[in-house]
């Protein structure tokens, strides 16, 4: 395996699909080449799945299902614990691949994805236990794995989001066909290979890839296959709705964590220094390319002037770095969104000078629900400030969004904040903490346009089980 220092783009290198050997030997595959962030040069070549490879992946997962689900629980747990160790040992290499493929900075690769990914594997390993059920003498309730699962993960946190799309089904006794991201195929390939190296039985996890836009309809083909029983997807609301519609045609359940437009509510009794710090951190981490990024500050008018002064001082002492977005198209979309907001009455409070590559961290004030930027997920380093007078108005502004993934409330009155949290339409609400918060111990997911179902903790395992009732006499 290459050392991180040796890894660099290599257009002659081919990233293979991860299928059992009998499905890949002596076969050739279509090839596509992911481009660098400037969309100018190929990074490497990737094998692309076609109908034959899709069938092979599902066949392998179906064949492995009985072996994996019947394996003793301690053995399954030990395999995942070994995988966690391998992820830590190969952390610098995973981080380097993330940097090359997605442009992620070190604090997002080695500072978050690698350690949190390894911790996630250990947490899920601890969730593997017997599903013997609850037993009155003549009535049994059993939980059983749903079967073969399709897992689809994005590029922006490829290790953590890729792992959870695989681990929770595995913990429930399922097998997984994993569709890696065409934006970071080598990162995902190494991640899955480490799971296999830890001792997973052949076919327990397979990986397929498809070119951008999936022109061969690989995802649709997998969903339609009757051997696949559930789909989990993390990505945009637009794509999620299409996948859910396709799954609905075949009456297949889905777990979806989709887009967000997280709001941070600042009340007049808040610790303003803390609120400023968390708003900036949540807005600009990983250049804003996080589904839980803080894109909106809902600020009580009575402390708006103080908040802005503290914000100005914080930015002076801690200027947020600019960085590349995933593609020139993403940068162009972001800059147009900001320009349109300013043309519609928003005021630029802060922004870095920009070039043709880096996305300028930007803060806008005087943003109202009449501005499209109030509602549109930017997936970029953007913070919009909207003021309110009454608590009722502030809560209405928080909930005036198609999304509901994460939210924050800043107040020194915990009782009041808890009462408000009850009324916030969001999968998670963090009091005196930032919107970017994801613990493997807790259920994670959204409401409204941010999806349904939950990853995390026992909830994540439960998503991939079915309940069976057995009764008997005598």
Image (tube, rainbow, N blue to C red):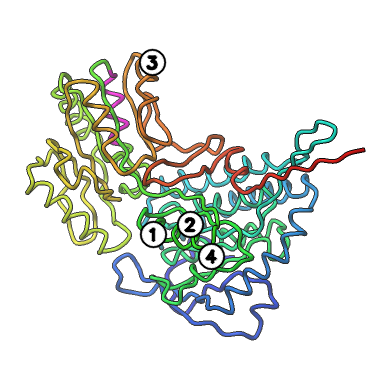
Classify 10 Å Cα crowding around label 2: few (below 14), some (14-19), many (20 and above): many
Place residue 62 in its image quadrant: bottom right
User: Does 269 sit above or below residue 125?
Assistant: above
**Which is nearer the N-term, disc 2 or disc 4?**
2
Q: Main secondary structure of the magenta part?
A: helix
Q: Which residue is mark 2?
A: 153
**Residue under the point 68% across and 39% down:** 126
Q: Which residue is mark 4?
A: 223
Mark in front: 3 vs 4: 4
**Which is nearer the N-term, disc 3 or disc 1?**
1
The image position of residue 290, as x and y in percent, is: 37, 47
Hey, which residue is sitting farthest right in the picture? Answer: 474
The image position of residue 242, as x and y in percent, is: 40, 61
Q: Which residue is mark 1?
A: 239
Q: Quadrant of the N terminus?
A: bottom right
Q: Is residue 363 left or right of residue 187?
A: left
Q: Which residue is mark 3?
A: 414
Q: Is residue 44 left or right of residue 121?
A: left
Read off the magenta span: 270-280
In space, the residues marked 2 and 4 are separated at their CA atoms by 15 Å
**Which is nearer the N-term, disc 3 or disc 4?**
4
**Which is nearer the N-term, disc 1 or disc 2?**
2
């Amino acid at each position: 395996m290459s050392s991180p220092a040796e890894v660099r783009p290599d257009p002659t290198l081919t990233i293979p699909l991860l299928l059992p050997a009998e499905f890949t030997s002596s076969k050739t595959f279509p090839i596509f080449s992911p481009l660098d962030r400037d969309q100018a040069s190929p990074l490497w070549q990737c094998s692309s799945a076609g109908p034959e490879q899709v069938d092979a992946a599902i066949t392998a997962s179906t064949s492995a299902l009985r072996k994996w689900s019947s394996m003793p629980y301690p053995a399954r747990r030990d395999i995942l614990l070994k995988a966690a160790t391998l992820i830590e040992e190969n952390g610098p290499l995973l981080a380097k691949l993330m940097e090359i493929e997605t442009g992620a900075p070190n604090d997002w690769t080695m500072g978050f994805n690698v350690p949190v990914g390894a911790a996630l594997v250990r947490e899920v390993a601890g969730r593997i236990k017997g599903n013997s059920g609850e037993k009155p003498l003549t009535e049994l309730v059993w939980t059983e794995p749903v079967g073969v699962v399709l897992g689809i993960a994005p590029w922006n946190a490829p290790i953590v989001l890729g792992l959870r799309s695989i681990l929770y089904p595995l913990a429930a006794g399922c097998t997984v066909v994993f569709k890696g991201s065409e934006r970071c195929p080598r990162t995902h390939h190494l991640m899955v290979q480490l799971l296999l190296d830890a001792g997973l039985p052949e076919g327990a996890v397979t990986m397929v890839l498809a070119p951008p836009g999936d022109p061969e309809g690989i995802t649709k083909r997998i969903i339609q296959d009757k051997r696949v029983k559930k789909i989990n997807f993390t990505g945009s609301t637009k794509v999620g709705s299409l996948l859910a519609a396709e799954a609905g045609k075949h009456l297949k359940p889905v777990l979806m964590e989709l887009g967000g437009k997280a709001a941070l509510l600042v009340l007049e009794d808040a610790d303003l220094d803390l609120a400023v710090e968390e708003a900036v951190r949540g807005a600009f981490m990983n250049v804003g390319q996080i589904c839980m990024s803080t894109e909106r500050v809902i600020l009580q008018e009575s402390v708006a002037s103080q908040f802005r002064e503290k914000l100005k001082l914080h930015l002076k002492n801690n200027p947020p770095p600019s960085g590349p977005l995933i593609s020139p198209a993403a940068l162009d979309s972001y800059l147009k969104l900001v320009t349109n907001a300013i043309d519609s009455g928003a005021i630029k409070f802060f922004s870095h000078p920009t070039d043709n590559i880096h996305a300028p961290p930007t803060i806008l004030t005087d943003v109202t629900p009449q501005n499209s930027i109030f509602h549109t997920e930017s997936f970029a380093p953007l913070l919009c400030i909207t003021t309110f007078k009454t608590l009722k108005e502030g809560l209405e502004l928080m909930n005036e969004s198609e999304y509901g993934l994460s939210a924050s409330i800043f107040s020194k009155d915990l009782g009041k904040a808890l009462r408000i949290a009850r009324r916030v339409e969001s999968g998670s609400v963090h009091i005196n903490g930032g919107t970017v918060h994801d613990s493997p111990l807790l259920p994670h997911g959204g409401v409204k346009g941010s999806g349904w179902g939950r990853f995390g903790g026992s909830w994540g395992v439960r998503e991939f089980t079915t309940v069976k009732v057995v009764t008997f006499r005598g």
